[in-house]
Amino acid sequence: VQLQASGGGLVQAGGSLRLSCAASGRSFSSNGMAWFRQAPGKEREFVAYISWSGTTQYYLDSVKGRFTISRDNAKNTVYLQMNSLKPEDTAVYYCAANRHTYSVRNYGSTGDYDYWGQGTLVTVSS
């Protein structure tokens, strides 16, 4: 089972990036999915969550209105559209699959996720 994150890169402040997370080895269509990020010297933090059906999303307050999480269960892929990027968004971004099916316990906790992608680096220059 593998989660492959991609789409990171270097962008100027105010720019946009779209991250993708493709799952292989099993379907995650019954699991909520999330993006976390980890900046240098900081702990990994929750960024966005999407329910198994795609009907519910939660966001870190600082990214609300700028980031959008979505999913395509037919492609077993989750996306994170990031607009109006800021230097403080610089981090390694990780996708993760929630351990529960058709529900979630604590979407913002790393402990609620069983599978993790390898991370993709997003660097926002000022």
Image: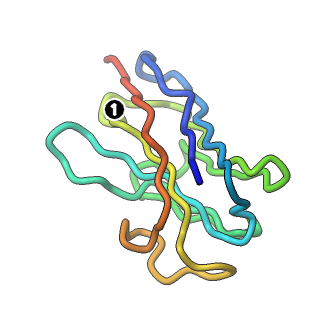
Which quadrant of the figure has residue 27?
Answer: bottom right
Residue most toward the right? 74
**Where does residue 125 sit, x and y in percent of width and height?**
34, 17
Residue 8 drawn above or below residue 61: above
Locate residue 68, reporting x and y percent: 62, 47
Where is residue 7? Give x, y as percent: 56, 27
**Which residue is at a point 26% across and 40% down the rendered structure image?**
39
Provide residue 86's location: percent of width, then percent of height. 38, 31
Q: Secondary structure at mark 1?
A: loop
Query: Which residue has dot 1 on it?
Result: 90
Q: Is residue 38 above or below residue 25?
A: above
86 relative to 96 in the view: left or right:
left
- For the point 63% across and 63% down, the residue is 50
Residue name at image x 65 percent, y 79 percent: 101
Residue type at mark 1 is Thr
Figure quadrant of the C terminus? top left
Q: Quadrant of residue 56?
A: bottom right
Q: Is residue 49 above or below residue 111?
A: above
* Quarter location, residue 93: top left
Nearer to me, 86 or 109: 109
Task: Judge by depth and name the residue closer to the eye, 107 or 6.
Answer: 6
* 10 Å crowding of disc 1: few (<14), some (14-19), many (20+): many
